[in-house]
Image (tube, rainbow, N blue to C red):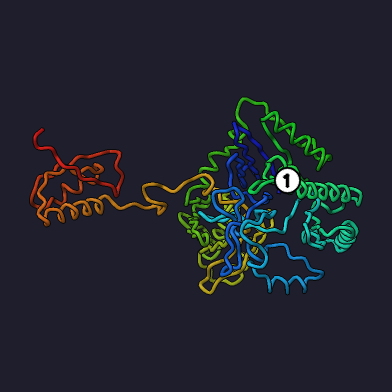
Amino acid sequence: MKQVLLIERVMDQTRMAVIEEGLLCELVYQRPDDENQSGNIYLGRVENVLPGMNAAFVNIGMEKNGFLAAGDIGLFAQSDRDLATLLGKARIEKLVRPGRELLVQVIRAQPGAKGPRLSCHITLPGRAMVLLSGVKYVGVSRKINSAGERARLREIGLSLTADRTDGIILRTAAQDMSEESLREEFARLSSQWDGMRRHSAHMKAPMRVYDDNDLALQAIRDRLTGDVEAIWTDDDRCYERLKALAELFSPALADRIQKHTGETPLFDLYRVDSQADKALQRYVWLKSGGSLVIDETEALTVVDVNTGKNTGRRDADDTILATNCEAARELMRQLRLRDIGGMVVVDFIDMRRESDREALLSVLRECAANDRNRTRVVDYTALGLVELTRKRVRQSLSKQLTHTCSRCDGNGIVPSHETTARRALRDLWRRRRAGDETALALEAAPAVCGWIRKIGMPEGGLLRLTPVETLGAGEYRFAPIDMKR
């Protein structure tokens, strides 16, 4: 699918938006104090070793220590069978001790207040290949279908890694590339990795060694393909960097880097912010009148599909299938846009025909194939729900752009005005029952005060109601009244 990439830099924040058919499909932020950035390499220090979990916690300079499992620590073997044996016997207390410094990479940002998942198996991505440090392995992207091309690339990969302990995975972009070009990129990645190791030997943990979240680098190295019609930016420095990176990684496509000079900001032209704001809401309305309800939890994301106003003009089964397919396409776009990872469970509208159920799974798998993050459509559960998983690379958009509401503590609901009124009255009743007849002022939201007047007040002592606009539902307070004033 054809794409347009937009890169905007305002003050110290950079944003990259991916537009497909006029719709915002991805939005990536880069801020100076971002945490849990996947792909970054750090020199970390082991803080705690937990034999019961067979893992360690590593300080990499973030608020939360990273989680390092025993199986993610470098274990070197001559074959896959030997490696499997070593992993099965790996015990964290024999591999690391508190205070030890390690080169680690963030492989997954964890949701909520958890620290990132770390690995000592460092991967260094290039445009045509990914360098695998300390792993003697050569792989070829599954998206390359030609058996002859796969064999050619594998043979080149074996020759490139013959004299090193590192391996490579040849990416989709390596297809039809010359051996000379592949050798040049392998030499550059190997030199970069060797330089990191030498440099880290003179550093003090915790310290970042490599930043893989430069949006200009990601745009050119990972995204600039024939499907990208243009990469636009309105920042002079960003434009020069994009041009330089394009000449290095994709000189044939360097002319697709464009500078926006109009008065209207680039993101305003494509309505990026208005579409991003909608991506923070629970409800997503479909053109047919149906809707999605998306709820993120710590364990998984739950999606409900409703027909809404879509009653259809055809057979009921055809209407339901059409609504479900529309919802499936929009859901897969929302997963990309909201950057939701982990397990996703979807309650589509019930379908009676088995052929319709299979058609819906086909639509989901077709859309999943366009996602850069690995997405797997599992199947229907015994209860008729659809399960799928999506690789978590960063925290979801909602986690990046919002914080927990101080009024509802993240529940999304607060006590009703009547409930708050009755709680306040019970507190007052308790005081009066204990013999406290102190004159009190009860401060609460105007609507809560209205409910107290409607319900009535317990006997004993003076009570003065004081409406306070700034108090929310669920909040009230008592204050003694100075009767001498």
Q: Nearer the viewer, residue 32 or 99?
A: 99
Q: Considering depth in this image, is 359 or 462 the residue closer to the camera?
A: 462
Quarter of the figure with residue 253:
top right
Image location of residue 193, percent across then percent down: 78, 50
Q: Residue at x 63, y 35 (%)?
A: 8
**Quadrant of residue 435 within the rendered picture:** bottom left
x, y percent for residue 90: 68, 70
Residue 22 seen = yes
- Work out which quarter of the rendered image holds the C terminus and state it: top left
Relative to residue 444, is residue 259 depicted above or below?
above
Q: Residue tagged by mark 1?
A: 202
Q: Residue at x 51, y 54 (%)?
A: 113
What residue lies at 19% left-to-right and 44% top-to-bottom? 442
Q: Left of 239 or right of it: where is 50?
A: left
Tell me: 354 left or right of 156.
Answer: left
Measured as percent of width and height from the top left, residue 181 is found at: 88, 48
Judge whether residue 330 can be spotted in this image: no
Q: Nearer the viewer, residue 339 or 133?
A: 133
